[in-house]
Amino acid sequence: MKTILIVEDETILREVLGELLIDCGYQVLTSSSGWQALDVLKTNNPDAILMDVMMPGMDGRDLYNEVRKLPSAGAVPIIMMSAIIRPSQLDPGIAAFVAKPFNLDTMLATIERIVTEPPADHH
């Protein structure tokens, strides 16, 4: 079973995405902030991270940079989502970008693609 970490400060969206992914057979970890996500990653190794860009405190771009420094999670694919930020404003190393508001089928297809494709070889 693949595990997805959802990092989203909006409670309703975090819960809806979590329920949707559980219904589709994923194990789900959730976090409401970048700092909380880093705590979750200390003891969990998800197959992918779905994170919002615009969050209070530590935004998704800062969190992305922090995750990349972690030996345990540095290679985990990261899907970023935002209503305001465009993909060109984000690190080119992200696995995927989903614009908000998103279609749930598009989101599921994106997650499925990311967790089933072989990891990119950076050598």
Image: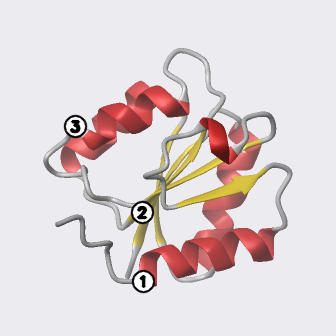
* Sequence-first tag of 3 and 1: 3
Residue 84 location in percent, x, y? Answer: 79, 34
Residue 20 location in percent, x, y? Answer: 68, 70
Q: Which residue is mark 3?
A: 69
* Sequence-first tag of 2 and 1: 2
Q: Which residue is mark 2?
A: 48
CA separation, marks 2 and 1? Answer: 11 Å
Quick check: 113 left or right of 3?
Answer: right
Helix, strand or loop at disc 3? loop
Q: Which residue is mark 1?
A: 117
Helix, strand or loop at disc 1? loop
Helix, strand or loop at disc 2? strand
Residue nearest the viewer, comparing 26 with 112: 112
Residue nearest the viewer, comparing 28 with 80: 80
- Is 29 placed above or below 109 here? above
Q: Residue at x 49, y 74 (%)?
A: 114
Quick check: 110 left or right of 77?
Answer: right
- Is 55 placed above or below 39 here? above
